[in-house]
Amino acid sequence: MFGVMAGLPMPAFAQTAFTLPPPPFELPFLPTLSGGWTATIGAEGVYKPDFEGAKASMLSAAPILYIRRAGSPDSFHSPRDNASIALIDFGDLRAGPVAKFVPARNQGGNAALYGLGDVNAAFELGGFIEYFPVDWFRLRNETRGGFGGHGGVVSDFSADFIVPVTRSLTFSAGPRFTWESTAATAPYFSINQAQAMATGLTLFDAKGGAHSAGVGAQIKYRINPQWEVHSYVEYQRLLGDAARSPLVMVRGSANQTTVGIGASYSFDFKIR
């Protein structure tokens, strides 16, 4: 639905490049999709662990996508936020669908994974809710169900203190926490009998629960109403069975740090 879009982001400047056809159906309990929307798209270069629990890191690219009602304020976004659409938007309270893509984990991609087999790519779909009790503080939760590489549930919690340094420059930081079900944890951290024989690692049946906790910080610079650049660092410490897995204890690390830099562009479009 949002494959090709162009325009400008702010109501005072917006010129809709084209109008999309109406959606094939509307859900009665959700606000209508018709009307004006503002999309923010972009990309990041991310230096992060090669796989969750790895010692070594690698550089990769990641997309940025947020969609909100046209005319609503351009709210704060954290590096942990996944692609989302704010169908419900009361200014200080927003909610809507969210999606995340989890790349495949291939045993040939890292020596630490040899003998563990491959884990297919996963798609996680769910919903998010975020609340600003005051302008300088945001609470957010994303809860997503996976299919493909895992069929479990992942729930991410974050809080961010937002400090405007100048009109264009903003600094933010805050704590993070992730909970995962067993079905989301086991494919990545369990060691079955065949894997134990192939690797020399001990058998391990990973269960879900508290998965990680950490902190993140970000600095953003708004060049103009359309363009913004940002840089960030996120640290998380694996917890529970994820941290106790032989893959992590013997071949990896429970300490996970991600550094990123990126840019994004905002524009308007309309749905009839």
Image (tube, rainbow, N blue to C red):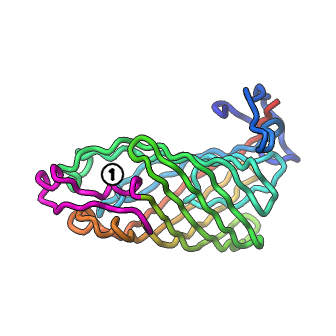
Q: Which quadrant, please, contains the C terminus?
A: top right
Extent of the magenta region:
182-210
Quadrant of the drawing holding the N terminus: top right
Relative to residue 42, is residue 260 drawn left or right?
left
Q: Horizontally, is 179 left or right of 220 in the view? A: left
- Residue at image position (64%, 63%) is 140
Residue 252 to residue 12: above or below = below
Observer able to see residue 8:
no
Q: Secondary structure at mark 1?
A: helix
Residue occupying image coordinates x 80% and y 39%: 32
Q: In the displayed structure, would residue 130 be above or below residue 27?
A: below
The question of residue 198 being in magenta is answered with yes
User: Percent x, y for residue 199?
Assistant: 14, 55
Residue 106 percent coordinates (x, y): 28, 44
Hey, which quadrant is residue 53 in on the image?
Answer: bottom left
Report if residue 158 lies within the magenta region.
Answer: no
Tell me where residue 131 appears, x and y as whole percent: 72, 65
Q: Which residue is mark 1?
A: 187
